Image (cartoon, helix red, strand yellow):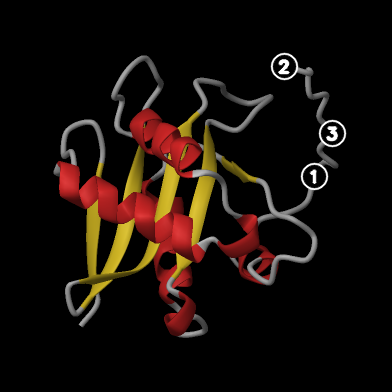
Amino acid sequence: MLKIKEYDEFKLPSASEKEKLIDFLFNHLDEFGDPRADIEKSIDFALKIGPSFGGFILEAIEENQIVSAIVLNQTGMKDYIPENILVYIATHKEKRGRGYAKVLLQQAINKADGNIALHVEPNNPAKFLYEKLGFTNKYLEMRHLKKR
């Protein structure tokens, strides 16, 4: 049976739960992932550990294992930029195609206060799920990266 766990600034994960979540996202985001330190920053932002607007984390748990997870950060903006950004969504490599991400994403849409943006690469198969749930491609994102 699928169980949904939710974390936010009022219900924080234990240190070991947080590490499991970081490991899960790092291992199951595949080529669309980020370094562990960046994943941890987004989690801390969602949990308001340090200065942030907050957000929340949802995990789908089956047989005491994470099978899918979402990290959503609030942007502190409204109208001209969506109030939320879905930073990470991942499903266990061996559990894909079973609807776990769809369940979590629908719950995130229902829970979020305001609109949600996300970035998706054109070759990411999850793009079709996002479109099915009503996400549209309004802009082409461009970035200027300063050399450090």
Alpha-carbon span between mark 3 and mark 2 = 19 Å
Mark 3 vs 2, N-terminal side: 3
Residue tagged by mark 3?
142
- Residue at image position (18%, 38%) is 12
Alpha-carbon span between mark 1 and mark 2 = 30 Å
Specify the quadrant that holds the C terminus: top right
Q: Let me know if residue 111 appears in the view.
A: yes
Residue tagged by mark 1?
138
Q: Nearer the viewer, mark 1 or mark 2?
A: 2
User: Quick check: 45 left or right of 138?
Assistant: left
Q: Quadrant of residue 130?
A: bottom right
Residue tagged by mark 2?
148
Residue 8: numbered disc? none
- Residue at image position (61%, 70%) is 129
Label 1: element kind: loop
Label 2: element kind: loop
Measured as percent of width and height from the top left, residue 124 is found at 71, 65
Amino acid at circle 2: Arg
